[in-house]
Image (cartoon, rainbow, N blue to C red):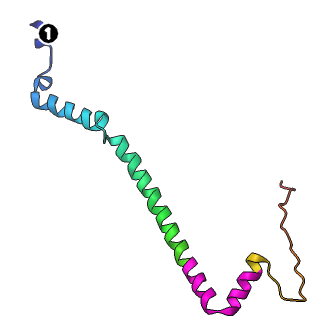
Amino acid sequence: MKILTHIPAFLKNKYLISFAAFCVVILFLDKNDFFTQQERRKELRELNQSKAYYTEQIATEKKELEALRNNPATLEKYAREKYLMKKDGEDIFLVSEKPDKTKN
């Protein structure tokens, strides 16, 4: 029984021991532990950023589609740029951009 006399009084408190055990389970042992929650918050932030990006892209594409439906000049410009279409008697010259190999 000498062993129990050397234990400080606050460590004999059953409520403190229960609270400490609860914290250990919540922080490390639970399937929804603290570290898993942090990873999920990070993933949620990334998904919200990609959602904002794709929402913006959809709005841009809708504007472009509406312009293509209503404006023949825009439709012609789109066909010339994307599909290299031309009118009779015209020549198309393609200029490719080569990367600069002289980087310092």
Q: Is the residue 8 above or below the residue 55 in the image?
A: above
Q: Nearer the viewer, residue 55 or 76?
A: 76
Percent across and percent down for residue 76 are: 73, 87
- Is residue 73 left or right of 101 when viewed as pictured? left
Q: Is residue 60 above or below residue 34?
A: below
Question: Residue most toward the top?
Answer: 2
Of the 4 image quadrants, the one containing the N terminus is top left
Q: As displayed, is residue 12 above or below residue 18? A: above
Q: Amino acid at mark 1?
A: Ile
Verify whether residue 73 appears in magenta: yes
Could you say whether the residue bearing mark 1 is in a helix, strand or loop? helix
Which range of residues does the magenta coloring cover?
61-80
Residue in front for this viewpoint, 4 or 72: 72
Q: Residue at x 68, y 88 (%)?
A: 74
Q: Residue at x 25, y 34 (%)?
A: 25
> x%, y% of residue 17?
16, 28
Please tell me in which quadrant of the rendered image residue 86 appears. bottom right
Q: Main secondary structure of the magenta part?
A: helix
- Nearer-the-camera pick, 15 or 27: 27
Specify the quadrant of the image occupied by residue 8.
top left
For this rendering, which residue is in front, 12 or 73?
Answer: 73
The percent coordinates of residue 83 (x first, y second) are 76, 76
Crowding at dot 1, Cα within 10 Å, few <14 / some 14-19 / many 20+, comes out as few
Give the image quarter of residue 3. Answer: top left
Residue denoted by label 1:
3
Residue 34 pos. (x, y %): 33, 42
